[in-house]
Image: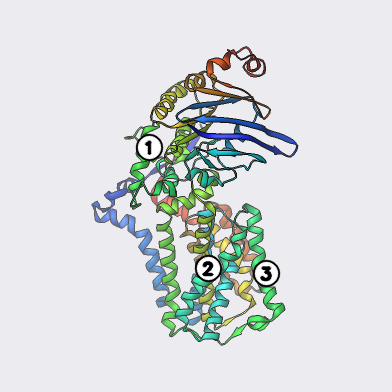
């Protein structure tokens, strides 16, 4: 007897669509819980962490989370696969470092300026590559951070191989702990909301069928620039934060890890969900730290976990959890 | 008055002459049918008019304005909308959200004035109803990826109508549709014409096309071989020889 897996929406999922979500407390909780609980949990982390070391890991996780959301946003909105998240990170990191050391601007101001300036610089650098698609765009983005790192190394500008040392740290440890988490949450929720606006829908359509978008009277290059700028802004923010966290910026800000790990986070968490990459980061980054005791074998264990996760849940963990939350599954005879 | 004029337009892909000195014009409120065998240059003509391909030589004029070589979005903004031969909707979005894209374009944004969330949805549902989506059903709200082919063709047409075009170009709108589906779409094209729209139809379904068209252009290997009213085309001996054969 042939069987097939039937998926049906849970009654409460149907009940909470549109305005009916407000019809009872349980309906409201059903809608709000998956959003509020993870947010609360993330905000509790600095309070729960037993040591400064764990604190650092949480902050690093959030920084990688931002890079992963940035990657996912660019992929979701334009269909462009970026292999150069390190470009955004590095440019943001160096801009923040320079502004602080050269002009003595306070960290909170450099953070803001580095986000805006860094995003603009990255957008200007990548703008000529926007007509490229798929693997061609990916390859050019991969090259940029390596190129900038070599330029800094060869010309010894901006500290050369020594990097910029003595950057100011955040005013106090609570700002340091919380700012990045709060911004991670704000950016993630804001971008998810943004993708449902009309402009967000237009951006999403570009990845579906850019020909039809052009035939609909929309300048796709201009819209790709918007998406790229927003994505780059998130990455630059992450880089600038890193600079003030370690009071240092060097060539490592352009390292390949920063381009690859965000993609792994997005793949594990669920591509195209924006929140999934955050989930992925909160799994993969702490995992990498936990495996440090293994020494050289660390990367092996890490890779195995990554491969198993992707093989078991190719749709991404968030999509999997969402389905379980919204639907019941059962086998039926056909 | 002519709304669109092609003057001696040529285009080669490598060694193949896809278009070889094609000239024709479309008068306002006319329904022009373009027919021809596969590879005769019909879709190339559509792509050149809509800006997706730049011609090697020749001019294209919309009313008095030269539009040769303008990018697709600028041509769409001037009022030329086109459908695509292979339907590829924005498949992640519900059907009615597909129309947000043209409704968001600079040409239309000023009509759906405030642009607050929801305004465009209402307009989108109106347009979908017009092309034959049942308004009070779930169909307009379904993801475009789950719609059957007939609805996708209608959705493609709706995407064009949302641009409020002066000139609508359909590239094999009827292909892949059942006879019943085609007969239900014919009145729709007629309605658009009575409303003052000019239509260019690239079509293989000759029976329906000859009923709708006021003028036919016949193409063969990149050249225009005949032009005239449907009845004259049917009698034209060159056309009979190269294309229509025994069919009519």
In whole angstroms, how far apart are the C-alphas of marks 1 and 3?
Answer: 50 Å
Chain letter of the residue beneath label 1 in the structure image: B
Labels 2 and 3 within one chain: yes
In whole angstroms, how far apart are the C-alphas of marks 2 and 3?
Answer: 18 Å
Q: Report the residue marked by disc 1.
A: B127
Q: Does the CB distance between marks 1 and 2 fall below 8 Å?
A: no
Q: Does the CB distance between marks 2 and 3 fall below 8 Å?
A: no
**Badge 3: how crowded within 10 Å, few (<14), some, or many (20+)?**
some
Q: Is residue B39 left or right of residue A45?
A: right
Element type at mark 3: helix
- Looking at the image, which residue is at 61% across and 15% down? B236
Observer-nearest residue: A294 or A181? A181
Q: Can residue A167 be seen by looking at this rendering?
A: no
- Looking at the image, which residue is at 60% across and 68% down? A87
In whole angstroms, how far apart are the C-alphas of marks 1 and 2?
Answer: 39 Å
Element type at mark 2: helix
Element type at mark 1: helix
Q: Report the residue marked by disc 2.
A: A119
**Badge 1: how crowded within 10 Å, few (<14), some, or many (20+)?**
many
Can you say whether A93 is above or below A314 in the image?
A: below
Can you say whether A238 is above or below A129 in the image?
A: below
Q: Report the residue marked by disc 3.
A: A146
Residue A323 image offset from top left, x and y in percent: 43, 50
Q: Can residue A158 be seen by looking at this rendering?
A: yes
Labels 1 and 3 within one chain: no
Observer-nearest residue: A213 or A107? A213
Residue B54 image offset from top left, x and y in percent: 63, 43
């Amino acid at each position: 007897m042939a069987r097939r897996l039937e998926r049906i929406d849970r009654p409460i999922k149907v009940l909470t669509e549109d305005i009916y979500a407000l019809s009872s407390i349980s309906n409201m909780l059903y809608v709000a819980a998956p959003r509020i609980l993870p947010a609360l949990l993330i905000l509790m982390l600095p309070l729960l962490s037993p040591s400064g070391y764990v604190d650092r890991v949480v902050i690093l996780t959030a920084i990688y989370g931002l890079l992963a959301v940035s990657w996912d946003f660019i992929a979701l909105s334009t269909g462009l696969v970026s292999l150069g998240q390190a470009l955004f990170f590095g440019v943001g990191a160096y801009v923040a470092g320079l502004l602080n050391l050269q002009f003595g601007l306070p960290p909170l101001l450099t953070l803001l300026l580095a986000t805006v300036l860094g995003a603009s610089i990255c957008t200007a650098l990548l703008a000529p590559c926007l007509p490229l698609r798929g693997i061609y765009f990916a390859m050019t983005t991969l090259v940029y951070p390596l190129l900038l790192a070599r330029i800094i190394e060869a010309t010894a500008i901006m500290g050369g191989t020594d990097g910029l040392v003595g950057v100011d740290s955040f005013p106090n440890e609570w700002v340091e702990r919380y700012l990045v988490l709060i911004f991670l949450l704000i950016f993630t929720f804001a971008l998810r909301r943004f993708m449902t606006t009309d402009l967000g829908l237009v951006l999403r359509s570009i990845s579906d069928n850019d020909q039809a978008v052009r035939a609909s009277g929309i300048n796709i290059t201009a819209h790709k620039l918007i998406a790229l700028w927003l994505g780059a802004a998130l990455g630059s923010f992450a880089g600038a934060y890193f600079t003030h966290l370690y009071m240092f910026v060097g060539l490592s800000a352009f390292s390949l890890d920063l381009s690859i790990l965000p993609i792994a986070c997005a793949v594990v968490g669920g591509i195209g969900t924006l929140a999934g990459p955050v989930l992925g980061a909160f799994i993969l980054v702490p995992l990498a730290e936990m495996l440090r005791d293994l020494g050289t074998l660390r990367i092996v264990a890490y890779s195995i976990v990554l491969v198993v996760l992707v093989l078991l849940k190719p749709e991404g963990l968030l999509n999997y959890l969402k389905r379980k939350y919204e639907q019941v599954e059962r086998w039926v005879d056909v | 008055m002519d709304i669109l004029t092609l003057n001696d337009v040529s285009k080669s892909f490598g060694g193949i002459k896809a278009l070889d000195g094609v000239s024709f014009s479309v008068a306002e409120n006319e329904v022009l049918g373009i027919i021809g065998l596969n590879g005769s240059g019909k879709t190339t003509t559509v792509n050149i008019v809509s800006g997706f391909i730049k011609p090697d030589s020749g001019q294209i004029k919309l009313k008095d304005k030269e539009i040769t070589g303008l990018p697709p979005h600028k041509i769409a903004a001037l009022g030329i909308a086109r459908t695509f031969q292979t339907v590829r909707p924005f498949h992640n979005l519900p059907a009615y959200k597909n129309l947000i894209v043209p409704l968001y374009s600079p040409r239309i944004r000023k009509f759906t004035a405030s642009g607050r969330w929801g305004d465009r949805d209402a307009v989108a549902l109106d347009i979908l109803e017009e092309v034959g989506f049942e308004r009070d059903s779930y169909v307009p709200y379904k993801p475009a990826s789950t719609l059957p082919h007939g609805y996708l063709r209608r959705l493609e047409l709706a995407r064009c109508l949302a641009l409020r075009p002066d000139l609508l170009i359909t590239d094999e709108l009827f292909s892949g549709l059942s006879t019943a589906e085609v007969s239900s779409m014919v009145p729709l094209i007629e309605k658009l014409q009575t409303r003052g729209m000019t239509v260019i139809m690239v079509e293989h379904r000759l029976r329906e096309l000859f009923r709708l068209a006021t003028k036919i252009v016949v193409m063969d290997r990149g050249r225009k071989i005949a032009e005239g009213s449907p009845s004259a085309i049917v009698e034209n001996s060159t056309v009979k020889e190269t294309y229509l054969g025994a069919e009519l």
